[in-house]
């Protein structure tokens, strides 16, 4: 990939996170829907998470506007994800 | 389809962790053996794109939503092993940073969406492109296989819930398979569009094409009908 192609790909991902993630459907996903309908959703609510995450539910803390908070968490996550994928790939290249 | 903590019994999530660790270990080994410099940025971009796309839930029907899983999409561009690694990286970050999917359930989530979703889905895709050896065939195969990967991952997820005693098998399997048969249509559309776009602008980025070493397109499952973009000068 050329440099500008990498930037294009990353920019596309960041734009999806920036502009589309705040307008994602708030409805429960397939598994949540089934858990609710079949009466086992409370099993997840009974347990506390084993580790506490810095940005639970894709919301950047301390922001009043939830859409902006989601957007920001999404962009940061997308950029971090590029770093993780790139980093893992580089480590694997070194070992090959 | 990210399973939270509390849905799976210890007798289910521990073996799922072991299975995923084995599958992921094997994928890391296979990817390291075949790693090319050009794959490094592509793995970064695919990780970022799949993470972003997974945030965008689309409505499917009566108060239910779904989002891209991206297993087949990653595998069509990166191959089944690097594809599974990308999906696993996304799932690990989602679990640890965004509390999406439980830590005990992470093994099961990796098994369902990376091992079944990317590797299983790729197997199905590969069979399909052998039956449809054309440019259009690749798009159709990717779309159909991506639908299948969502359906299969959902069914296996339901079996894990049944084995855990969370919900009876006769209840949870048809419910999960049914709703994800519809969500999978969204997966197929997105996967088909992205693969179609990549085929148009950089057909050599499709796995089995430019990444096949030396002999070039002739050794690839696609048999050179993509015009066999030259190996050199494209990194």
Image (tube, coloured by chain):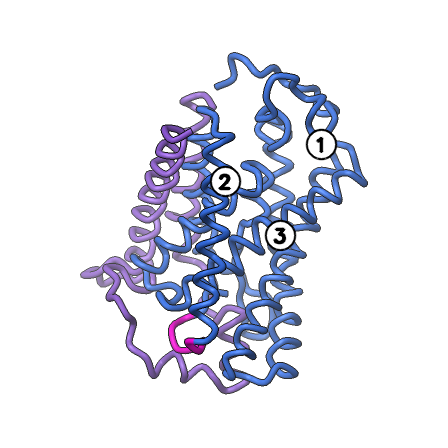
Tell me the distance, in whole angstroms, between the alpha carbons under discs 1 and 2.
18 Å
Tell me the distance, in whole angstroms, between the alpha carbons under discs 3 and 2.
13 Å
Residue at x 26%, y 66% (from the top left corner): A51
Chain containing the residue with disc 1: B
User: Pointer 3: residues within 10 angstroms few (<14), some, or many (20+)?
Assistant: many
Q: Nearer the viewer, residue B148 or B183?
A: B148
Q: Nearer the viewer, residue B107 or B175?
A: B107
User: Pointer 1: residues within 10 angstroms few (<14), some, or many (20+)?
Assistant: some
Q: What colour is chain A?
A: purple
* Residue placed under numbered mark 3 in the picture: B120
Does B218 sit above or below residue B28? above
Q: Secondary structure at mark 2?
A: helix
Q: Nearer the viewer, residue A43 or B49?
A: A43
Residue at x 57%, y 38% (from the top left corner): B79
Residue B82: numbered disc: 2
Does B75 sit above or below residue B133? below
Q: Is residue B6 magenta?
A: yes
Question: Disc 3 or 2, which lies upstream in sequence?
Answer: 2
């Amino acid at each position: 990939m050329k440099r500008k192609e990498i930037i294009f790909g990353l920019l596309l991902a960041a734009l999806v996170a920036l502009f589309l993630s705040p307008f994602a459907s708030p409805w429960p996903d397939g598994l949540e829907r089934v858990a609710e309908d079949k009466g086992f959703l409370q099993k997840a609510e009974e347990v506390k998470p084993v580790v506490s995450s810095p940005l639970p539910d894709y919301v950047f803390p301390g922001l009043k506007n939830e859409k902006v908070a989601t957007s920001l968490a999404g962009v940061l996550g997308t950029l971090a994800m590029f770093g993780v994928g790139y980093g893992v790939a580089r480590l694997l290249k070194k070992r090959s | 389809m990210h399973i939270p903590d509390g849905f799976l019994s210890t007798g289910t999530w521990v073996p799922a962790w072991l299975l995923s660790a084995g599958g992921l270990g094997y994928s890391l080994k296979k990817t390291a053996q075949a790693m090319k410099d050009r794959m490094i940025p592509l793995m970064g971009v695919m990780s970022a794109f799949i993470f972003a796309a997974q945030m965008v839930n689309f409505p499917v029907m009566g108060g239910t939503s779904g989002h891209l899983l991206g297993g087949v999409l990653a595998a069509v561009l990166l191959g089944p092993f690097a594809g599974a690694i990308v999906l696993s990286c996304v799932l690990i970050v989602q679990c640890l940073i965004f509390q999406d999917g439980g830590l005990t359930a992470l093994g099961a989530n990796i098994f369902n969406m990376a091992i079944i979703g990317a590797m299983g889905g790729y197997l199905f895709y590969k069979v399909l492109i052998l039956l449809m050896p054309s440019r259009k065939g690749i798009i159709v195969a990717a779309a159909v296989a991506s639908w299948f990967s969502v359906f299969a991952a959902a069914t296996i997820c339901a079996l894990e819930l049944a084995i855990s005693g969370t919900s009876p098998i006769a209840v949870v399997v048809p419910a999960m398979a049914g709703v994800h048969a519809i969500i999978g249509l969204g997966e197929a559309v997105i996967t088909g569009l992205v693969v179609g776009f990549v085929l148009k602008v950089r057909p050599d980025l499709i796995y089995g094409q430019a990444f096949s070493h030396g002999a070039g397109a002739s050794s690839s499952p696609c048999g050179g009908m993509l015009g066999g973009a030259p190996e050199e000068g494209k990194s």
